[in-house]
Image (cartoon, rainbow, N blue to C red):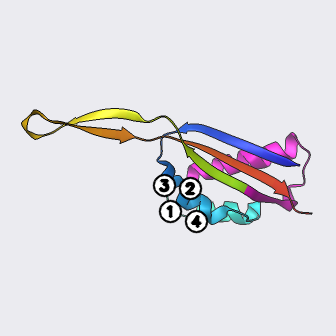
């Protein structure tokens, strides 16, 4: 049995999220939450909220034991990219890419 939580179109680059996801992969949920609370990255509060949602999904929807949960899978995929223009010298225009992310966390119970 597994419990999932998704977060779509988050306004943060997938590259920044991937760094923090690598810290919590295959960890028990209590250790993962502590890691996210103490990691000074922009993605940490977003992932902490998503992990709490996945834990609640496991507890309420799938009747899984909270104490035996661990982060089985966690990954990020790129979402839509917002394209903006920055005026530059001599009438040029530089493109600014504002990237978004789709984040997924999967929890499973230890046997």
Q: CA distance from mark 4 to mark 1?
A: 6 Å
Provide residue 5's location: percent of width, then percent of height. 72, 43
Provide residue 18's location: percent of width, then percent of height. 55, 56
According to the image, label 1 marks what residue? 40
Q: CA distance from mark 1 to mark 3?
A: 12 Å
Could you tell me what secondary structure mostly forms the magenta stretch?
Answer: helix
According to the image, label 4 marks what residue? 38
Mark 4 in CB contact with mark 1 (< 8 angstroms) = yes
Residue under the point 10% across and 33% down: 91
Q: Nearer the viewer, residue 29 or 88?
A: 88
9 versus 26 height, above or below? above
Provide residue 86's location: percent of width, then percent of height. 23, 37
Q: Residues within 10 Å of mark 1 (few under 14, many from 20)?
A: few
Mark 1 in CB contact with mark 2 (< 8 angstroms) = yes
According to the image, label 2 marks what residue? 44
* Whether residue 8 can be seen here: yes
Name which quarter of the figure residue 4 lies in. top right
Magenta stretch: give its range. Answer: 45-72
According to the image, label 3 marks what residue? 16
Q: CA distance from mark 4 to mark 2?
A: 8 Å
Q: Is residue 68 magenta?
A: yes
Q: CA distance from mark 1 to mark 2?
A: 7 Å
């Amino acid at each position: 049995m597994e419990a999932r939580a998704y977060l779509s179109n988050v306004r943060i680059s997938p590259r920044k999220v991937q760094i923090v996801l690598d810290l919590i992969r295959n960890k028990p949920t209590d250790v993962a939450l502590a890691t996210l609370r103490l990691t000074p990255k922009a993605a940490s509060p977003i992932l902490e909220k998503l992990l709490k949602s996945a834990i609640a999904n496991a507890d309420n929807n799938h009747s899984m034991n909270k104490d035996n949960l661990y982060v089985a899978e966690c990954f990020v995929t790129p979402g839509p990219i917002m394209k903006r223009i920055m005026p530059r010298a001599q009438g040029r225009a530089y493109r600014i890419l504002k990237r978004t992310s789709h984040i997924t966390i999967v929890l499973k119970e230890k046997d």
